[in-house]
Every structure is written in structure tokens, then in C-alpha cells.
Amino acid sequence: MSMNTAEVLSLDSVLVQREGNIASDMDGEKVMLNVKNGKYYNLGEVGGAIWEALASPVSIRRIAEIMQETFEVPAELAQQDVIDFVQNLLNEDLVAVVSGS
Amino acid sequence: MAGTAQCLGYKAFGLQILSEFPLPELPRTDLPGQIGSVSVVQADLSARWETIPKITANLGTAGNEVMFMVKDTAIFSIQNGSTITVSPAAGADPDSVRLFILGSCMGVLLMQKGILALHGSSLVLEGKAYALVGRSGAGKSTLASYLMDQGHLMVSDDVIPVLVHNGHPLAVPGYPQQKLWQQSLDYLGMNSSAYRPLFRRETKFAVPVHDRFQSEPLPLAGIFELAVGGAEEVKVEPVNGLERLHILYNHTYQKALVDPMGIREWHFGLLASFVNRLPMYRLTRPEQGFSAPRQTELIMETIKQKMEEMNR
């Protein structure tokens, strides 16, 4: 049984996509289907970029750097947005914590 | 008789069908279709059926081949989006065999060719194609018949082939018959019992509609999902966001085969590529009473309103 909802993420948390999700492009936004629960998700443009970054294990800090570069936002904003978004992914059990939280 | 059978060319589902089995309900053609040509041949499949890996008692798949068996009717094999092989059982009813060739087999073949097929009827309304989808018993056939009585042309019945080009869906014509043989529709559904009676469960007639048939593809401009219950009056409401993906998935013809055929990713990607540009509505009717006239009014109002919005 996963205890994902109890996890508290930090910049050093390393996470990775869980398997069993199919993502596709929908007019620039990333939509996703979780094959197991049959739920659909719209990750949006930024969320889609975060999802792609999670294809292999990666720290929140590193994802925020990528977002900062790609979308030209200040570091602190990028970090907070990434933490919030990844927390949502974690709550939905779409990603797994590898280490560091 | 193998090798000597005469192949006749027929036109349906955007395909030229070269068939050793007579398919009298289909128009003849000597030309390849928009989607290409396929062959329907007769051969003994009993040995192959024994060896193919099974998903259910009646359904097997391996590589680019899907096989299914209908007791006392035939064993069918659909391969590479190009060939349907049929091995009729001794004394099989040719009408039943044909029913599966034109239904389940074509559905699988379209999927193998990378063509989306929806389960429902499509009709020409205001110059464009609209799909009516919904569960068995939701009233698709009744409403489609009524719309045709009102002078609207049918594009396809039961299987709606959808060609997606640059994010624009196109409804491809089926063939000029309203098929009211419900039994083939759900045959491949894997949650059904392998032993439930397949035939004579519901006997209806196939109605030729040569004079009310749209024979060229048309842009698919919207989907109406028919639903029953709840309200006392017929009502229509738009379906938005991710629920549209769900509707398309749910009403994919033989969706139970999407995973066994290993095409889930392709299927989802295809749906995502046009779902944003395809208006969808849920049309709910009361359980009792004949709702087709009111459903038609609401559908036409909805379409006209949408067209006005887009022209604004």
C-alpha cells in the first residue's frame, strides 16, 4: 500500500513516472490516460513538460531548473510550481518517490 | 474449390472488398477505395485456431492476426489489415457468416489499418456528418431511422469509420443498409459469457437504403451520445473537456480489442489529436414514450446554434 499522500516533497526529492500511463499531445497540451484506473488527466503545457522530465528519476530541483529555462520564470516561482504540481501527481499515484524526501 | 473461386469487387467502409463470398447488400466496384483494398477468402482455419494464443474461449490474437470463432457459424481470421479468412462450419447459415464478415471482421480490419471505428450510426445533417452513439438500447437505430424518414441521408450504420487527417475527422460511408441485426455488435465484448446464445436472440430485418445513402466521406462535425432515464423531457447538454475522450473511447467499436491488439497508445493518441475540435453532446430521453421527434428537434437546434456561433 502506497503512503504517497503522506510524503512531503523537498527540492532534493527524486521522483519518477509510474508505469501504465499513456500520454499524448492535444493541441499543445499534454493529456494522459492511466490505464489501470481508467482516468484521464489534462496536464496542460507546463505540466506536460514536467511529466516528460519525470521519464527517468530526477530531483525537484533539477525539474525546476528545466522549467525556469524553458518558460523563463524566476527560480523561486518555478520551484514552488513544480513542487505543487508534482505533489498532485504523487497524490494521484502517477509518480513514485525514488529518494530524498 | 480453393483457387478457383471467383472474386467480386464490392465497395464499403472506404474499402474495395474483393470477396469469394457473395455480398449482395454491397454496391459493386472495380476501383480501390480511399482506404485501399482487402480480400475475403475461404480456407480451412481449424488447425490455426488450435494453435493461436487465446484471450477468451472464442477469441485469439497473435502478431497482426485476430481470430474468433462463432459456434456453428465459422472461424474468422483477420490479418494485417488486408485479409479476412473465413472457415464456415458445416451447414452454416450464409447470412450469419456474412453478418460477421461485415461487422466484427471489418471492425478489426479497420483497427489494423489504423482507422478509428466508432460504434453507432452517422447521418448527414446540415451538410455534415454527425455520429449518434450510445449503449445498446439507447435508441440509436430508432432515431437514425426517424432521421432518415425525415429525409436525412445515412453515412454509416453500426460501424462508423473515422479517418483523421491533420486533426480533422472525416466520416467514411459504410454501405447502403441499415443493419438491425444487433447480435453481432457485442459479440467480441470480452466480459460476455462465452456460451451465451448468439443468434435468434433478436431477429430484425436488414433494410436496404440505397436511395438514402451518402456515398462519399464528409467531415465529422459532432457527436451526440444518446442516454436514457432521469429527466422527464428530452434534454441536450454539451460534453466538455476530458469527458470527450471518455466518450470516444467508450464508443469505439470493439474497444475490448484495443489492449489485446496492442494499439492502446495509437488509439489514445488518435483520439487526442482531434477531440478538442469535435463538439459533443449528451442527449437524454425519458425511458417511456417515443422521443425521436423531440430528439430530432433538439439535435437540429443544437447544430444550428453551433453553426451560428462559429460564423459570428
Image: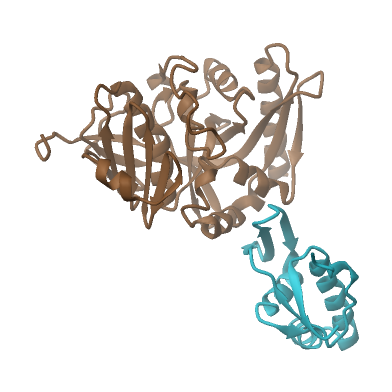
Q: How many marks?
A: 0
Task: Specify whether B210 is left or right of B140.
Answer: left
Task: Specify whether B97 is left or right of B183.
Answer: left
Indicate whether B242 appears above or below A92: above
Asked whether residue B156 appears in the rendered view, the answer is no
| Residue A65 screen position, x and y as percent | 78, 88
Of the pair B98 and B68, the residue shown nearer to us: B68
Q: In this view, which residue lies farthest toward the top?
A: B289
Question: Which quadrant does the N terminus of chain B fall into?
Answer: top left
Q: Colour of chain A?
A: cyan
Of the pair B130 and A43, the residue shown nearer to us: A43
Task: Specify whether B139 is left or right of A67.
Answer: left
Q: Residue at x 44, y 16 (%)?
A: B200
Q: Residue at x 49, y 18 (%)?
A: B201
Q: Colour of chain B?
A: brown
Asked whether residue B295 appears in the rendered view, the answer is yes
Of the pair B55 and B83, the residue shown nearer to us: B55
Task: Specify whether A32 is left or right of B146.
Answer: right
Question: Which quadrant does the C terminus of chain B fall into?
Answer: top right
| Residue A51 screen position, x and y as percent | 71, 73
Scheme of image coloration: by chain
Indicate whether B147 appears above or below B290: below
Indicate whether B10 appears above or below B200: below
| Residue A15 screen position, x and y as percent | 75, 79
| Residue A95 screen position, x and y as percent | 74, 71
Q: Residue at x 54, y 51 (%)?
A: B168
